[in-house]
Image: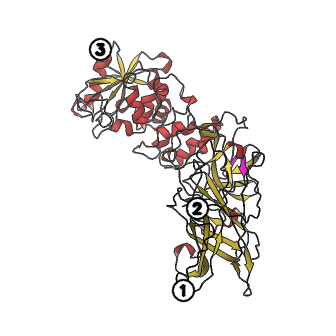
Amino acid sequence: MRLLHAMSMRLKSFEENAMPQYAILSHTWGEDEVSFQDIHGPDAASKSGYKKIRYVCEHALEAGLQYAWIDTCCIDKKSSAELSEAINSMFRWYHKAIYCYAYLADVPDGTDVHTETSAFATSRWFTRGWTLQELLAPTDLMFFSTDGLYLGSKRELGKEISEITTIGEEYLHGEAPLSQASIAKRMSWASCRTTTRIEDLAYCLLGIFDINMPLLYGEGGKAFIRLQEEIMRNSDDQSLFAWGFRDVRLLSANSLLDSADPFGPFAKEPGAFKDSGHIIPDELEPPTAAFTMSTNKGLQMKIRVDLLLSRFSSPIAILACRPEEKFLWLIGIPIRFYSEDSFMRLGSSTYCLLRRDEAVDTPYRSLRFLTNQNHLRPLPVGPQEINVCLLIRKIPRHFSSGGLSIWDVEPRDVWDPEHRIISLPKGDERHVVLRLWRRQGEGYAIVLEYALTPDDYYRIHRRWEYCVLQETCEQPRSYDFYSRSKRTGPSCNLILSREVTIKERKDLANQPGVSFQIIDIEMAEDAEKIVDEPSYYGGKSGISQSVTEMAISPPYRAEDPFSGLLLMN
């Protein structure tokens, strides 16, 4: 390790176990920095970057220190071996420094550092990848303006820095070790930061995860994948897989219109963890065996997969982690199976919440989380010939009690939540159950019964089944349906319109000329009211039937039933 003598401005090499006390500089690089080759040359003092070198040496001398470390001139970046050693050691070097001086070139003198819109709060220093470890590693960090005037210390400005960076003060001040923060939380700290080189998005995080790995400039985004693989080898924290932007949609794995691409276990960039800073390992989950990587075939792991969560439209892999503020919920990711014991993540942008009691009886399975498709095809999901396609075009949004939302549709394999389409294969005689939910805490279950017409085509039968949905503590996912003739309260009228054929639509490019029947769900104040509008259906009367709503007790009233559920309006 080289240090710069603060008085003579000459570099001197030391073994790390014999280093003198030193100060260290934190800054963002500019256009005209003083390099290792420049520092002893005659033109060093004429470069714009020399000013901050002079500042840090002056402050070091005032503090009684003889040496300083500055990354621009203390590393010979033409030596790949030296650069690799420096990057792998940098977090430790910043931590061992007696003082760290952060030079903020874009913060003028006299800046009010306590306001949210100040030059301090919006400084480029808080947006760069390398300065994250330079914020966390030093014990004593002090900030200076563009002219070298003191702005405050990390301790003095802890509240403001925490609000700027979303990093808890306990981690800023070293009161809690970084290892105590979940992997997802630490990744989220870097989610909005940038680096000049793509590879540095991974390399700047080595010290934060206490990881060492060789540097391969030119590998691009593979560096971040390698970082996650190294983290996985040293930790069983499954929040590593809890990345993705929260989304209200969950594409169907068994839909004709499925456009979700498969993904492996690892995110492509830190930005994927932007919404994952609140995810922590679940304390009640039993310890699992360490992850093992099987060459390029995937990640072998023990994980729970639930195939029966009816409100989701694909199998859910249940991770051993939860939201920090929600003890009763767990994190899940939608998946698609490629064999009986291998799967991939379905889409890159979603993770979901599920209630803990929904997962408590789900056994662990030894499965392989594929890192790429390896030219595999998904398992077949059933007949491809479709005889019934129902488009739920309309559901009440402005009903006096808050409107309705579709919670789930059973059986799940016929439901495409993104497009609100029910696709029933030929010969499938199962009834379809629509579960609707109202924010006031009531729900409705509608059973659609099909009958085969003389032209060998399934149509919705004219007779509707009234039903009551029951959920018990003993069997929270068991549904019993009963006929009910007594009508009370407002009715939920299902209006079946004339059949239409969609021929020109990009989503149906591989299924041209698919016939749809359109369903409009409306609320009526009178339970006995039969909706019959001949003009709406081109003069045909009697085509619609009424369906009585059935009030049901919402499960788990203690929390908002919509919190964490993927509802399609």
Q: How many marks?
A: 3
In this view, the mark in front (3 or 2): 2
Query: What residue is disc 2 on?
Result: 260
Separation of disc 2 and disc 1 at Cα?
38 Å
Most foreground residue, 259 or 148: 259
Q: How crowded is mark 2: few (under 14 residues within 10 Å), some or many (20 or more)?
A: some
In this view, the mark in front (2 or 1): 1
Nearest to N terminus: mark 3 or mark 2:
3
Visible residue check, residue 317: yes
Mark 1 element type: loop
Q: What stretch is highlighted in magenta?
A: 287-307
In this view, the mark in front (3 or 1): 1
Report the amino acid beneath label 1: Gly
**Residue 538 disc label:** 1
Q: Which image quadrant: the N terminus?
A: top left
Give the percent coordinates (x, y) of residue 354: 64, 47
Describe residue 464's horizontal placement relative to residue 241 as left or right. right
Describe residue 567's horizontal placement relative to residue 316 as left or right. left
**Residue 62 disc label:** 3
Q: Which image quadrant: the C terminus?
A: bottom right
The residue under the point 59% across, 42% down is 240
Describe residue 179's horizontal placement relative to residue 11 as left or right. right
